[in-house]
Image (cartoon, grey):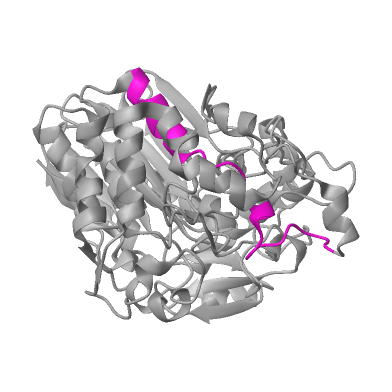
Amino acid sequence: MSETRYALNGMVCTIDHLASAAGVAMLDRGGNAVDAAIAANAVLAVTAPHMCGLGGDLFALVHDGNVSALNASGRAGSGADPDRLRAEGHDRVPAAFDIRSATVPGCADGWLALHERYARLPLPDLLAPAIRHAAEGFPASPLLGPAGDFLGNLAGAGDFAAMRRAGDVVRRPGVARALTALGEGGRAAFYQGEFGEGLLKLGGGEYAEEDLAQPNADWVEPLSAEVFGHRIWTVPPNSQGYLLLLALEILAGLGEPGDPADARWAHLLVESARAAGHDRLDVLHETAVAPLGTAAARRALIDPERRSPVPDAPSAQGDTTYLCVIDGDGMGVSLIQSNASGFGSLVFEPNTGINLHNRGIGFSLTPGHPAEYGPRRRPPHTLCPALVTRPDGTLRTVLGTMGADAQPQILLQLVTRLLAHGQTPGEVIAASRWALATGGSGFDTWHSDTVIAVEEGAPWADGLRERGHAVESVEYGTLFGHAHLIDVLPSGVLAGAADPRALIGAALGR
């Protein structure tokens, strides 16, 4: 069960109490929500390499009276060659043990962009907790510890060679050096320093020096939609965030969704998600225009009582971390940062031990596809932070989740529970979830028919089957993301909850 936590002067929610504590420490020192978010994310880059890190990408929404969106997702290297992959017999970008799935990581660029625009505290101060944990050691979490058996033999993964269980102390001296270089020397000290030099050598022609010299962080126009008397915000393509907004608009036109304990509620949300996303593979690319004007046509495909013959838009498992912060002045940050799947590509930059993401698996290898793998291109992205404002534009909620392709589906459930049904943050976050799933490799399910994976404890399975859905039961916490939420109550009090599925997550206030 997730308990709702309350605070007056700021709150930080992450998957790791060490990261949440670092964020609150920055608030205590006079920092704002962005300072806290950078500090918390930096700690996660050390303690949660199975979900995020300096080798991954970042998206963020910031509310400081207005809503701003940051896209810090990396681009493929100048040596990206789709013909070579096809000639090798690939029909998709290889997901593991292949440098070609790693676009230039955008995480550090994202921190720098956030810091330049909003921060109050010096960057070395924000990175100091993460550097300390990396240099002096931290206890492995229950989700990280058991991975030592697998990681111990991988090139560059020596930091984890002696790790076997939760509580084992892990030290990451190379990551400490990389963070120190970034804090003291700025962008060039990271992307063109020890890490960048190792990446160029490891890439063997995949990257050029100019690829690492060009920042991968852009302030972009956020997307929004008005539903349930509020405005919901997310980031635009190359993110799949539009699927959340489109599904909400479809759902809002179907009438009152009913009781969340009723299978019809789950059916309407499932059908809205399927109708919103069935063509995602065809329409999502880095210059795509989100199809938010199609809600009515897609809604017409839905039978409110039966599974509709709409092509599926299935989900995938993945490993990502989401965090959110609201400070005492009301600034809010909704930030998501990811390796894509697990430890990413399972390729480690040898100088620093930073594991590289495999976000390149979002590319297509179909010749001429708008998301085709190619030089300096950004792949379609699953990451989609969310933020809610009231009709007067004031901040109501920051929320998000891990969960790869399932992120918009999970957020659809969270937003509906919060805004349409008035549930508390703790109730919203702890409630059982559904997701479109196939049990595939994690990122291949857009190509397959789906079943509805229903988390144990949910009351919908029989009713969904009666409506024509294929349903499978899934153990609580295994498929449905780590979500967090902070809500600003009418009194101004902050109410937040961290996901119990993360095991050591924490919603900390001040």
- Residue 212 on the magenta span: no
Q: Quadrant of residue 113?
A: top left
Q: Is residue 447 above or below residue 423?
A: below
Q: Nearer the viewer, residue 414 or 286?
A: 286
Label total for image:
0
Q: Quadrant of residue 489?
A: top left
Percent x, y for residue 442?
61, 67
- Residue 100 on the magenta span: yes
Image quadrant occupied by the C terminus: top left
Q: Quadrant of residue 122?
A: top left
Q: Nearer the viewer, residue 508 or 254?
A: 508
Q: Nearer the viewer, residue 34 or 489?
A: 34
Percent x, y for residue 441?
64, 71
Does residue 464 show up? yes
Q: Report the side of 121 relative to 89 (left or right).
A: left
Percent x, y for residue 490?
20, 32
Residue plotted at (62% across, 43% down): 250
Q: Report the side of 125 relative to 182 (left or right).
A: left
Q: Is residue 83 above or below residue 61?
A: below
Does residue 231 show up? no
Image quadrant occupied by the N terminus: bottom left
Q: Is residue 418 above or below residue 460?
A: above
Q: Nearer the viewer, residue 191 or 227?
A: 191
Q: Is residue 359 above or below residue 207?
A: below
Percent x, y for residue 68?
44, 23
Residue plotted at (58% across, 26% down): 214
Residue plotted at (82% across, 62% down): 90
Q: Report the side of 240 relative to 85 (left or right).
A: left
Magenta region: 90-117
